[in-house]
Amino acid sequence: MNTPIIPDFINKLLQNVSTPEFWKKAIGIVVAAALILIFFRVLQMLVARAIKKGVPEQRAQLIRKAIRYTGWVIAIVSVLQGMGVNLSALLGAAGIAGIAIGFAAQTSVSNLISGIFLISEKPFQIGDVIQVGDISGIVLSVDLLSIKLQTFDNRFVRIPNESIIKTNVINLTRYPIRRLDIMVGVSYEADLHKVSDVLKDIAAKNLNALDNPEPLIYFDKFDASSINILFGVWYEQSKLVDLRNSIIMDIHARFAKEGIEIPYPKHDVYIKRSSL
């Protein structure tokens, strides 16, 4: 019966650890491994500098990681070979173990395949603001197994790639301009032509709103206590907070000045007297 690979290696190591030749060889192996790691580190820096402008950040990040992991694999293999480990037998055993691990890691494989699709499709890039379900945040990295987000309240979120592939993803910063939609309710007694003119004037005077495209004024429906109007104002994506705050304050102040009522839900109760 053959002696197992790892125990046989450990026995030889214990027998030779006290000899000068062993330490001389060990130092040489460590130096060689360090030189390999240094070489791949320098290579990673040079490649990162070369592709800095012409390659999207998520691909550049993936290339850097591939170079780093390749360097570590080569260094570890060199160390094992230098110490006399039988790599062919070790790789055979690792192959059998890999099959068993593969069955147990189907989710990871699915995430890996999904990650390849995400990187090739490029629905978003590092630095974009996306919304996945009820989670919104800035994309920090796009990896083979997951993406990492930083939410606006400064939380770190990891979302598996498989979940990204299976759900709707909204890229909030894909285009340079967006439209802010505000639902405004006015009373049934209001002059709708006047309301439309006032809303257009509010948009024209707001410094954070764009003149082109023109604002959208859409009379939505007759609600229980108001006529609902969709007021859409275009803006540059970096101006969202400034526009939302200023435009709502402008509507409130201008409507009060023009005598346009913003109704609130109310109910009229009629009491009928009995003939008795």
Image (cartoon, rainbow, N blue to C red):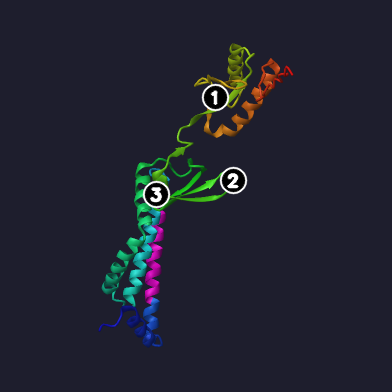
| Mark 3 or 2: the one toward you | 3
Q: Is residue 261 above or below residue 120?
A: above
Mark 2: few, some, or many residues within 10 Å (few <14, many ≥20)?
Answer: few
Label 3 is placed on what type of residue?
Glu
Q: Please identify, in this view, whether the residue under mark 1 or under mark 3 is nearer the observer.
A: 3
| Marking on residue 39 | none
Give the quarter of the figure containing the N terminus.
bottom left
Which secondary structure class fits the magenta region best? helix
Residue 88 higher or lower than 222, as above or below: below
- The one of 128 and 189 positioned closer to us in this rendering: 189
Residue receiving disc 3: 162
Q: Amino acid at mark 2?
A: Asp
The secondary element bearing badge 1 is classed as strand
- Which one is earlier in the sequence, the residue at label 1 or at label 3? 3
How far apart, in angstroms, are the residues tagged by discs 2 and 1?
A: 26 Å
User: Which x, y percent locates residue 27?
Assistant: 40, 77
Segment tinted magenta in the rendering: 28-48
**Is disc 3 placed on a helix, strand or loop?**
helix
Q: CA distance from mark 1 to mark 3?
A: 36 Å
Give residue 45's position: percent from left, percent from top. 42, 55
Q: Is 40 rendered above or below residue 31?
A: above
Residue 229 image position (x, y, % from top left):
56, 21
The residue beneath circle 2 is 153
- Label 3 or label 2, whichever comes before in sequence order: 2
Q: CA distance from mark 3 to mark 2?
A: 25 Å
Magenta segment includes 43: yes
Q: Which residue is mark 1?
A: 233
